Structure formats: C-alpha cells, structure tokens
Amino acid sequence: MPQSNTISILVVDDDPSILDVFRLILEQQPGFIVETLATSREALDLLDTRYFDVIITDFSMPDIDGLTLLREARARGCQSLFVIVTGKRLAHIAMDALNDGADFYVQKGPDITKEFSRLIEFINTSVPKKNAELEIVEWERFYHSVVESSPDLICRVLPDGSLTYTNESCMHFFKKQYNDMIRENLFSLIPADEKSVVLAQLQNLSAVKPDVLLEHRVQTEGGETPLLQWYYHGFFSEHGAVSEYQVAGRSAEGLIRIGDKGTAKTAPAPAAAAAPAPSSAPQKTDAYDWKGLVDTIQSLDNPVFAIDKSGTIIAWNKAIEQLTGVETSQMVGKGQQEYAVPFYGKPTPMLIDHIFLPPGSPAAADLPVIKKVGDTYIGEMEHVKIKGKPMLLWGKGSPVYDGKGSLIAAIEAITVGEPQTDADTGSREKYLGGISSITIKASGEGIGGAIAGAIGSSTGGYGVYATDQRVFVIRNPDLDAEKMQGVRFSTFIMDELFGMTIDTRQKSIKELERLKIFEGWKKDIISINLKKPVLLSGYLTFIVNNAGSFRIYIDHKKSFTHLEQLMQSFCPEKIKVE
C-alpha cells in the first residue's frame, strides 16, 4: 500500500506521447507518484502485486481495451479509482464504463490539457474519501461474514412480504438459490390458518414497540411445514408506517431446556447483530448499497430523484433541491409517495410509479398518462405548483437494474417551464411545445451537406418548436456544441437514460421569432416527412407550398421520439413516416 501522504497513479496507454503528458502534468502535483505502462496485460500483471490509488487507462488499446481491463481488474478485487480516457465521443462507452465500475471519464483530443484540472480535482477529492471508506468496507465484510455464517435464517422483508435479502442459512433451509429466494414472498409461505394471526401481530408493531417473537410454520420446497421461532423487527418511517421487516428464524429442534422438564419455554430472540448492516455503517435498503447510484445522480445538472422498490426515496439531487427548495436530508428515506409533495402539495402517484408495475397492470389506470419508449417512460405536460408558483412539469422515468438483470430502483428526471398567457405571446397563438438538442442538426446545402447530416458529422444544437399555427426551427445558443469543453459523465448518463441532452424549457413566441432559421405556417405546409434513425441519422423534413423544403437531422432515437410526438400535436394529418 502507498504511504498515506502520497497518491499512487498508474497510467496505461499505447501512445508514448500521451504517457509523457500524463506523467509531466500529474507529477507536478504534491504527493502524486506516477507509473506508466504501454499495454493492459502488463498492467494486469502489475496489479497482482501492487496497489494504486488511481488507474488511468485509454479505451482503445492494441491488446486489451480499457473496459476489458477495468472488468478484469474489478473481477480480481481491485478497489482502485478507475479513469477511462478515450477520443471517441460515444455515449455507450461512458455508460459501459460506469456500469463496470469506472469512477471518472476524460475526453482525449487536442484540448486534453484542459481536462487535467478536472481530473486533478477528482483525484485530490476522491482518493482521501476512498481511503476513509476502506475501514468501513472491511468492517462490513467482517460483519457480513458473521451474518452469513449464522445458523439463524436471516432475511429482510418488505411490508407485503417480498423478500429482499436472505443469508446462506435461509437459502439452505428452503433449498433455493439467492435469486430464487428474493422472488419469494415470506407471508405466502406461512400456512393460511396461521398467516392471519401473524399479520395481525405485525400490525400491532410500532416505532415504540418494533419487535415480536412468534412461533409459526413455513412451507419448504419439499412441501413440509416445520415449526420455527421467528423474531420480527419493524423499521418505521417518521410518519409511523413500516418500511421493512428484519426477520430471523430458528428451529427449536434439538433445543435443550435447562431446569424445565414440563412446558416448553420460549427461546430467546436471535441477537440483534444479525442485521444485514450495522447501525454505524452507511445504511442500505433492499440489500443494495446505493452509493454509486446516488453519486451519479448528484452529478447531473437536471433535477432528478430515485426510489427503491419499496417506494423509499434513495436520491434527491442538488438540482431538484434548488428547484423545489426541499433539502435532500428532508427527502431521502421517506416513502408513501412523499416525493410528490413539493410538486402537488400532497403524496400522490407520479410517473415514476409506473416503473415497478407489471406490464398491463390495472393499477396503471390510476397513474399519470405516459408513453413508453424502450426503457424510458415519458409523461405528459402537467400543471403544478412549485414553491407556490404555477409551473408546467414534464417527467421522464427510467428503471435501474442490477448486474443480474433484476429491477432494483427507478429514476425520474423533471423538466419545468412557466405557463404562458395571451399577454406573454402577444396574440391568440397557442404554444404547443418543443425541444432543442445537440443531436438535432441542420446541415449545409447540396449533396455534401446532406451526406454530412446523414452520417452524423454536422454540428448540432438546433431546436424544433410548434404553436397551433406554425412551426419553428431555431439555433439554440444554450446548446452550442462547438463551445462544449470536454465530456462529462452527466451528459452521457442523461442522454442514455432519458435522451435528455436537450433543452425543453418553454420559449416565448418573440424568442422563437428572434432565433428562427426556418418558419412554416400550418396552412402552407404540404407534408411533414419523418424518418427514424437506424444506422444513419433520421430526419424531419418540412415541405412548404411555394417555398421548397427544409430538413433537419436527428442522431438520437429518443430525441426523434420527442419530435414525432410534437408533430403529432402540431399537424398529425400531414405526417408521413418513411
């Protein structure tokens, strides 16, 4: 292990000039010790015997690419902070890196030196924090080893009986693997003649009296129903509703009762230390550590929150704090649809509740109307009040899966705008909506411009907006891709989760007229042609009477979906899908 006052860094890149740049700049920092290697195989061999605080690796390597190196290192238990460097501006590289355990992303290019200030800040901030967490990690590893080796059947159960965690003894008792166990419902395994009594006892629990010791039977894989002693401990929200149960069961078989040859005595409850996580360690829900997800959501510029399967808020980022005026500490840990209060003034279903419902569930009829595009849930514009001010809200949701493909959480991103009145627009013209995106492009004239747009090489940052009378294409100054410095995880994550590298803020008619590069009145438009992006960019073409045509290109399928919805609202009878 390195000295506590130093930070050891390994840089892996097949380009000697890049290695020299990294070494030259990083070693200027106090305490930074840098080693460089030209191949991933050399790096893996070195990592068998050496620990580095930070590993910086190029994505494109001749022997093993950076993501494969990352996966192999993580598979060997490497706890180093991992930084992926690439010259490819592809969202899936950043998402794959994040999913495989990377911690940071750097864009290689002619301006790479500008990325170093961000990288150095990340290293100086994250390494001490990582080292401080090692003691907690070691403590959790020891603690979980105690839990797994316990003879008691230890599990976590949601209020409806769904199992979210079981230890090895529990799996051995029921003769099922972990993935099969967490699909089970503990209450459904209790015989019908005993279940109502058990549930009644659990209903009597409270934050003041959260524990009860019961004897009841459970059905095993072989159809047997052995009698066990079960210790239930309820976890309660600040509103007094149970959010989860900690359950520990033990068999009375072979129990020796000292000093009593007659009636049986109740065995003591299993030790409180049988919980999946000690109270001094960071809290987890559903047996998952949400730290990585929470950190990712906190890095996003858009207002975003997340809930686990029980509906408990696990993330509430800075942007949504600023939007609602409600601090993270007031929201995280709350359930019962409390996330809706800052928008609707009361707990009520939101778009995010769709994500945990089975397909075609009747319960969806009571939820806000949505459109599902792939794994993205897109809501309709709603009128809400935020901090007492009337606003328009547009939600987008996305599921979160673990490495085994199980749905474990849901995320919702919020976009808001201010409602406009006739006085705002200066006419009776009604604003319908619109979006701008770096994936929406307007190319040059002629065949060269058409080819550039189709293969995705022209500059994006355009927008399409519609009223009930006309459509506008604008150049959005807030999304000038030529001014973007570097590449951030947040840009890629929002793009992949929601197609949200976009600006959906409502714009005034005067602003649209000022920024327009194309304008078409509904009465003059002959047709609106749409082509979905597949291998090449998709496009949207307006053919206008006595004015020719105007085409924009769309690189991203989700951005295309937004435009398709907008055109359906604007002039559905003139749409042609190619």
Image (cartoon, rainbow, N blue to C red):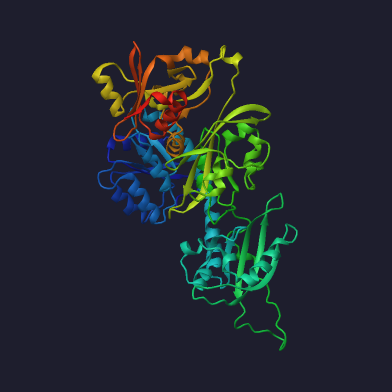
Q: Residue at x 70, y 65 (%)?
A: 201
Q: Quadrant of residue 280?
A: bottom right
Q: Which quarter of the picture shows residue 203?
A: bottom right
For image coordinates 43% across by 49% down, the residue present is 80
Observer-nearest of 24 and 508: 508
Q: Is residue 486 above or below residue 527?
A: below
Residue 279: percent from the left, percent from the top?
Answer: 63, 57
The reply to whether residue 525 is visible in this rendering is yes
Q: Residue at x 47, y 68 (%)?
A: 176
Quadrant where the C terminus lies?
top left
Residue 45 is situated, as x and y percent measured from the top left of the image, at 32, 54
Residue 517 in sight in this render: no
The residue furthest right is 208
> In this orientation, which residue lies closer to the viewer: 134 or 549?
549
- Quarter occupied by residue 275: bottom right
Total numbered labels placed on residues in the image:
0
Picture layout, residue 346 above or below residue 227: above
Residue 533 relative to residue 176: left or right: left
Residue 396 appears left or right of 236: left
Q: Position of residue 171 (x, y in %)?
A: 50, 69
Q: Nearer the viewer, residue 8 or 570?
A: 570
Measuring from the top left, give residue 304's x and y in whole percent: 54, 37
Left or right: 19 as drawn, with respect to 393: left
Q: Viewer-proximal residue, 270 or 359?
A: 359
